[in-house]
Amino acid sequence: MSALSSFALRRAVRAAVARPRPMGTLTGATACEKAGISAIGITGPKKIFKNLTYEELRAHEEANKEGVVTNHASCFAVDTGVFTGRSPKDKFIVQRKGATSNDHVWWGSVNQPMKPEVFDELMDDAVAYYNSKEQCYVFDGFAGAAAASRRKVRFVHDLAWQQHFVTNMFIRPSEADANDVSIPPDFTVINACALKNEKWKEHGLNSEVCVAIDIEKKMAVIMGTWYGGENKKLIFSLMNYWLPMEGTLPMHCSASVDMERENAALFFGLSGTGKTTLSADPNRQLIGDDEHGWHGKDGIFNFEGGCYAKTINLKEANEPEIWHAIKGPAALLENVAVAEDGTVDYSNTAKTQNGRVSYPIFHIANHEPTSTGGHPKNVIFLTADAFGVLPPVSKLTPEQALYHFITGYTAKVAGTERGVTEPEATFSACFGAAFMTMHPTKYADLLKQRLSEHGAQAYLVNTGWVGGAYGTGHRMEIGATRSCITAILDGTIGGLPNSAFATDPVFGFQVPTAVPGIASSVPLVPRTAWADGAAYDAQRVKLAKMFQKNFTKYSGPGVVDYSAYGPQLAK
């Protein structure tokens, strides 16, 4: 394809995704049928607002008094009540006897089983709740930018801001798609957030809150929580179930590509490791900030149509891309401090440290409009190691990459939570265990295939502490970390001769002893930055044992054992 035709295609795609296409207001006895929700029993509302524009949503939000207009580019802000984050202990998946899903779901504390009769009762309650309403909001959209893996999703909501949220986070349909209800959705979510499950003890659940998923019925119910993120992560959990069946790897990561679309990269990382910040590069195009798939033939693609960024201590100077993406009427703030005059204070965490903003991805000036990026050349695992053990950057073998992918390591620092007085290791399989519907090794097997087929190189990047653990050493400066990332993306580190690497005697990965463009003051070999080398050795052994203990849960009959590629200690 010529440069001109490629540019024209991108411009056309950009124009197509720039705004939601409305179906508008449906009224009368046939409103529910026209909206496509009568088939699930919702027939009561006589007025339905479906796939509204951002301007229409703003008008509804203000008329309903659902929040306030702020002075940050006239952005609308809402408060989600006592729930300012997901409620993972209240997520359940229906376990139906003889169902295909029974053999594939990773049952346990992440995917808790629910009896079919309990789900059916909750569904009846949610339908009855909406049948008592005069009006409601319905959104039809898509998850998955790649046509082969795309899923049509439908949401039923009580409030305009909730439709606003999913309008931001999912792929907005064309006008024809929005108006066509002849093709049923692949999945429907009834969000009855104001409805509490008063019979939760009788149902064997954990609280009045419930996020219940029935894979076989293609339905889900959300009760008792207003938190917007439950909507998006519910569908992400389902993509983590559907896509591996097709041979596509779902991933909890950000992704970017260079301006020529020849050098894509993935950034995996838990909260606080820099996943969003480091993927926002003015010299590259953002594919997405959170959820992606890796198809064996076509490469990577975004699941979403927007971004959901943390706002804690947000400043224009530090994160200009996110700052300028907050503009009305499309951007939506959740749980941020807003004064009576509309002034936003992102440093005020009295409500929560998990203040958020959702916005359509086209608010990022250098986004990749097709939301795709070919096959990545580099896969980067980000960790904030508060023990001060891991090097700023290290090169992994494919087998080591699988081990660290399953491990999903980062660390909490002292003082971040009550009772945490020293660094505390945190492990989350595949850098997103809460959303992994299948056993983590299933995703690792798919990653193994992709790395082998396309020759992507994996790296481990420590955005945490050097020169000592938290309290003694210091955190890596963001500039130094960006230099490491740049050296990965431009091929500098990958092109170094073998003599330029030292093998870590415990973790086994390759550590560059010097990297062109990175200041000599940056301790690439972490032991050299510790005042007491023996203390570093002891700390490394301590962390290695934590890795080994954690990984025992991923070994056993029927799964590939990758423990040999993790840290090894002398016996």
Image: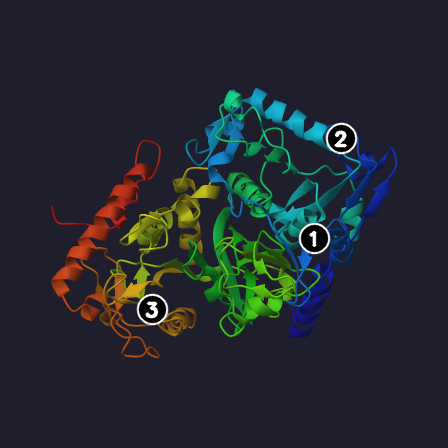
Q: Position of residue 315 (x, y in %)?
A: 52, 70
View extreme (front): residue: 340
Which residue does the image show at 48% across and 30% down from the upper left? Answer: 206
Cα distance in 3D space between marks 2 and 3: 56 Å
Q: Residues within 10 Å of mark 3 (few under 14, many from 20)?
A: some
Kind of residue at badge 1: Arg
Which amino acid, mark 2? Ser
**First in sequence: mark 1 or mark 3?**
1
Residue 482 percent across, percent down from the top left: 41, 71
Rounded to the nearest whole Å, what is the CA distance between mark 2 and mark 1? 29 Å
| Residue depth check, mark 2 versus mark 3: number of the one nearer the observer | 2
Q: Which mark is residue 476?
A: 3
The answer to whether the residues at label 2 and label 3 have Cβ atoms under 8 Å apart is: no
* Nearest to the observer: residue 489 or residue 407: 407
Instruction: Give percent across and percent down for residue 201.
Output: 50, 23
Q: Residues within 10 Å of mark 1 (few under 14, many from 20)?
A: many
Whole-Å distance between the Cαs marked 1 and 3?
Answer: 39 Å
- Front residue of this view, candidates 241 and 345: 345
Q: Tell me the element at label 1.
A: loop
Please report whichever mark, 2 or 1, sits nearer to the chain's N-terminal start: 2
Q: Which residue is mark 1?
A: 172
Can you identify the residue that label 2 sits on?
132
Q: Quadrant of residue 239?
A: top right
| Position in image of residue 198 (x %, y %) | 58, 26
